[in-house]
Structure formats: C-alpha cells, structure tokens
Amino acid sequence: MSALTTRSSRLPQGLADDLAACRAPAGSAATLPPACYTDPEVHALEDAVIFRQGWVGVGRSDTWSANGDYRTFEIGGVPVVVVRDDDGHLRAYANSCSHRSSQIMQGEGTCARMRCRFHFWTYGLDGRLIGAPSMQRTPDFDTGAHGLTEFALSERHGFALVSLESDPPEIDAWLGDFGDLHADWPLADVVTTRRREFTVDCNWKAFAEVFNEYYHLPYVHPDSIDDTYEEPDAPDPVNGAYASQFGATVGTGALLDDTQDRALPTIPGLTGRPLTGVRYSWLFPNLVVALGQEALWMYEVYPDGPDRCRCAQVICFPQATIDGPDFEERVADYYERFDVALSEDIPMLVQQHAGQRSPFARQGRYSYLEPSVAAFADWYAGRLLSVS
Ligand SMILES: [Fe+2]
C-alpha cells in the first residue's frame, strides 16, 4: 500500500458485504449503503481510494484562460493548486509551502508567481522555489531541493484531470471509449461562458447522482423541465471510468419548458440523434456533464467532509453561438433554466442527506430510470473493496 493510502482503514465486514451487493447490474443491485454518504471513516477511505488514486476532474481547461491563472482545490484532503504556467501549460502542484507547509494560494485568480504569505517563500509557475528570504545563514540550503510537489495533469476533450498518484493509470485507458461515445459533440472546442461555485449540505455522491437520473424529474421538476424530457434510451454499455445515457427531449433540455421558443442555434456540425436530446455522462468520480443540442452544461463536485460538497456549475457554448447576435441577452434564459433546476434539486438533496444520517437508513433498490447511478455505485464499490 502506498503512502497515499496509509490513512485508509480496512472496511468493516458488514460494510464490505453491503458494498458487494452494489456490484451488479442496476436491476439486481442494491443502492450504496447510507454509511457511504455520512460516515467519517468511509469518507477517509474515499479520500484515499477514490480521490488520491486514479484521475479526478478539475473542470474545463479553458477556464484557466491566461498564463498565471490559478484555482485551488482540495482533492482527497490534499490542497492542490492548478495554474497555467509561463509556457501556457496547465500544471498541478501540492498547495503546501516547502518551508513549514502553509497553504500558499487561496481561491482563484491570476498571479505572476506563487508566494506563501507566511514567510514569503516564492515559487515560479513551474513550481521551482525562486525566493526564500533570510535563508542565507542556513547551511547547505538548496533552493533546488525545495520546489513544490507536482502532480500529474492530463487534458482530454477540453477537461482537465489531476492524479495524485506518483505513477497514475494511463489516462486514455482510464477514459476508455469516452471519446468515441462523445465524438458527435465538439467537446474540446466549446467555450465556457459561466462558472460559478457554491456549496450544498449533502454528500458529494448524492449531488452527482441527482444529475444523472430521470426518476426524480416529474416529482422534483414538474413545472420547470419535466415536460421537456421523454423516456431515456437504455444506458450505453461503456468501457472506462464513466457512465452515459442519452435521452430524447421535446425541444431542448437546456431551456425551461415555457421558454422553448428562445433556443440558441444548435452546435455547428451536430447531426442525427444528438440533435434530438441530451446525453448525460458521469466522468467518475466527480464530473457530471450534459451534452445538449446547443450547449454543454456540467457540474464539478468536490467533497468537503461527508456532509457537504463544493460544486461548480459550468456552462459552455460553441464560439459561433457566442459570436452570434444578442448572445449575452439570450443566454440568460439558459442560465435561468440551470439555476431553476438546481434550486429545485438542492432542498431535496438536503432532505435526502438528513434521511441518510439516520441509523435506520438502509440500502434500497434502483428503478430502471437510474442506470448511471447504479453504474457509479458498482465502480465505487469496486474501488473501496479493492483495499479491503
Ligand atoms: Fe434534478
């Protein structure tokens, strides 16, 4: 077991048995045990096995638009800063000073270099230590030995992914046939027009789940988006760390039921079935993506303990649409649709979390309308069981 997993403990046998019940097709699988959404020990194991191993999404590459743009994250309990370096390359570093480990960068912004506020140790965007005041009397102090720890960062299809493993899995093997299944959409070319962060008082998995199932639409979104969505297709059999399902819509899934007449142009070059609905894909563990006829909308989800998650709503359009007439005015209808649906989901998620915290909460079963939720649970259970 690597140093990255030393905080993890072995699974209690009861939990291992419960997780094993999730390793089945949706029709026969149990839902994840409630402890996976609430138990601090499971959360610590998740940090080690789900977030400090494999690849974790950190969003859309184009949201770091200029050299020096940075954004901080906490991934598996590890402060991380992602920055575009002086050569234009996106890079990820441990966001802990090499002096006495203070977090260096906070939030997001643009910088010429990364300076720790505590004692002004200063790092270039390449992670090298380039300034350390009052260290001249420290014998044998070698600035070259005190740069920031760098993590693997890969960009695929416009998404940036980070791995905290020193020898991460090969990214294309991790993603499997994700690129093939999404080849109809110009994923790498769409442009982010909005990214906004917020927190929700629920477990990160529940937030991702609700974005990937049609079951709740008539009950949680009866007057906003439910009329737009028809019965989804069967889930796509996939190879890789993701799940995906296409569903037809009446009009566009990216607008409210009552603003369907205000649709922006469809994505140039999009033809056939993708023009008739939305593909919902969950890039495990923490990016949930919707590919519509005219837009891509997605959420980044990061755990903040078992009881809270930090999320970012991200919306992207083709450049040709952004350049079109009255885009700023017309896109408001889109932002409203995403915000309205979210405002309907969040109270439900908070209520769900309260129920999950009960000692009497237990595993349930899936409807046929939740196959991507079941696919994630199968993958997640497999990862946790791999260390037990
Ligand atoms: Fe919803």
Image (cartoon, grey):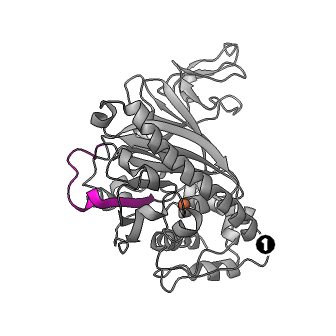
Q: Is residue 18 left or right of residue 324?
A: right
* Depth order, front residue of 218/385: 218
Look at mark 1 in the image and give the residue it sits on. 358
Residue 56's x, y, as percent?
50, 51
Q: Is residue 164 left or right of residue 241?
A: right
Query: Is residue 372 one of those drawn in magenta?
Result: no
The N terminus, quarter of image:
bottom right
Amino acid type, label 1: Ser
The residue located at (59%, 61%) in the rendering is 205
Q: From this view, report whether residue 198 is shown above or below residue 221.
A: above
Residue sitting nearer the eye, 173 or 236:
236
Q: Residue furthest right?
A: 359
- Where does residue 328 sit, x and y in percent of width and height? 42, 31
Decide if residue 263 is in sight here: yes
In which of the image's four quarters is ligand 1 placed?
Answer: bottom right
What residue is shown at x 59% (from left), y 77% (from top)? Answer: 31
Q: Nearer the viewer, residue 222 or 179?
A: 222
The answer, for residue 164, to whether it is visible in the render is: no
Rendering quarter of residue 174: bottom left
Instruction: Tell me the element at label 1.
Output: loop
Q: Determine whether, in the image, residue 118 is placed left or right of residue 310.
A: right
Residue depicted at x 47% and y 55%: 288
* Residue 37 in the image: above or below residue 301: below
